[in-house]
Image (cartoon, rainbow, N blue to C red):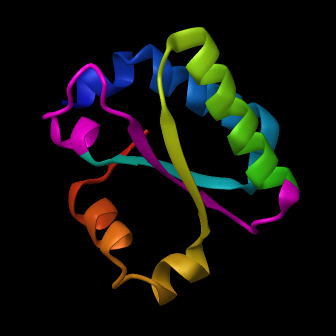
Amino acid sequence: MKSTIQNDPVLRFFKDSIMARLGGHLRQVMLFGSRARGDATAESDYDLLVVVDQIDSSVTQSIDTIAGQALIEHGAVLSAFPITEGDRVRRRYSPMLINAAREGVAV
């Protein structure tokens, strides 16, 4: 699975783009959901947890812009969720974060 993720052009595009926009404020990008588990179909979206220092309008705007570009350029739907490390700890029992912790793969 890891080699598939490393070779995925959509994930490469997202990681390169988000790193260029957020730089040192980006802590981690994790893929979770069907694509991380390996049971995705061609129509499956990309579920991404984007861990950042803080969430503000520039972070959410960057994620939205990149998701739009991914749809236009790659035909891929990205569901990217920004979260801080503190929120990830505080909300660790939320279903989404439980799934991300259980099946997530670093991008």
In-front residue for pair 47/106: 47
Residue 54's place in the image compared with 107, above or below, is below
Does residue 68 appear to the left or right of 78 in the view shown?
Answer: right
Q: Residue at x 62, y 33 (%)?
A: 67
Residue 90, position as x, y percentages in the image: 50, 89
Q: Residue at x 50, y 45 (%)?
A: 79
Does residue 107 appear to the left or right of 62 in the view shown?
Answer: left
Residue 9's place in the image compared with 104, above or below, is above
Residue 52's place in the image compared with 105, above or below, is below
Q: Is residue 54 magenta?
A: yes
Q: Residue at x 51, y 22 (%)?
A: 12
Does residue 13 appear to the left or right of 4 in the view shown?
Answer: right
| Quadrant, the N terminus | top left
Total labels: the figure holds: 0
In-front residue for pair 58/101: 58
Residue stretch in magenta? 34-57
**Residue 107, quarter of picture:** top left
Q: Residue at x 64, y 26 (%)?
A: 16
